[in-house]
Amino acid sequence: MHMHIPIRVALQLSLLPILGATACDTSERCFPVPSVAARRAEPEWDVQGITLQGIEGQGRALEGSKEQAPRLRDLDGFRFVGASVVLHGGRLVADGEEVRDAELEARSADGRTIAMRVGLLERPEGDRFAVSIDGSPLCAEGDEGVFVEGRWDERGAPHFDAAELTYACKSGVIAKCVAWGYAPWEVGAELHQSCTRLARADYCGDGKPWTLEGTRIDVYDTLGVQQPVHDPEMSFEAAWGPRGALCVAEARWLVEDDDGERVRPSCFATLPNCTSLTAATELGAMLANDSAHTPIPACE
């Protein structure tokens, strides 16, 4: 049944670019980093032992081995007004009825009135929504995303308000974490937020990703939502909390400048070392990942 609900929406359009997908040239990948002078002013950090997470060679597509992208969100912090609209188990409910196909009236942060269409897409892997603004889809075909409560700031920190929602495309980490089994309405907002830090390799919790588009990682947790793959090409990287890494073994990408010096996030100087999720549970960790720790040259 199609449902047309005239709803007025006050929203903030915040379309972030895909971060961290820079390349030195068209043939070779490199990692974008701050200036050499700024890097050398940061404290040094010595890598300690890394525990391999098993030697059973399993397929790269098995559960737990994930590709992730640095993009955080697409449409952040908007409010429905003029009707009672809530998010219930990932579904939108307006005035007690589920929104499956609705024409919504929206108002941008600068007061412009725009048209929003929301369509529910039921998929075996989980429901998604197709959202368009003034007739233009926010996500590419096949990349339609999800709604979650709250909004995210430029540092990647969530701010929860029952009246605020964020819409994220499937390729963004907010939606990826839902697809991986860490939907906030199922596992809680903190574990979902921990996943977004993990997916972007936001070790310092400052919103700066230390990963590149399409990097393969192995995600697992203490709840059994995701089990480790035990890929012999990977080893323990870090354990995660909602504010960033709780402890680390080694960075996802081994970045070196032109002089062959390692470049690491500044917070590595103070983060505890850990070599397994089991050890990190003493710090309150419920989520961790392995990675290949791939060498890569730096570029500015």
Image: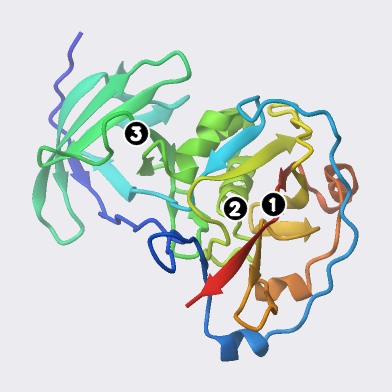
User: In the drawing, does residue 210 fall left or right of residue 72?
Assistant: right
Other residues around mark 1 within 10 Å, as few (<14) / some (14–19) / many (≥20): many
Task: Find residue 152 and report its horizontal and vertical position in percent.
Answer: 45, 55
Residue on which the image places disc 1: 241
Front-most of 97 and 29?
Answer: 29
User: As displayed, is residue 238 above or below residue 25?
Assistant: above
Calculate the distance from the C-alpha at mark 1 to the C-alpha at mark 3: 27 Å
* Of residues 28 and 89, the one drawn nearer to the viewer in this rendering: 28
Q: Mark 3 = which residue? A: 143
Circle 3: residue type: Asp
Judged by depth in the image, the label closer to the viewer, 2 or 1, is: 2
Label 3 neighbour load within 10 Å: few <14, some 14-19, many 20+: some
153 versus 45 height, above or below? above
Return the disc, 1 or 3, that comes first in the chain's sequence: 3
Q: Residue at x 49, y 44 (%)?
A: 173
Q: Tag count in the figure?
A: 3
| 98 relative position to 227: left or right | left
For badge 2, the amino acid type reads Arg
- Nearest to N terminus: mark 3 or mark 2: 3
Q: Circle 3 — which element?
A: loop
Above or below, 165 relative to 186: below
Residue that numbered label 2 is attached to: 197
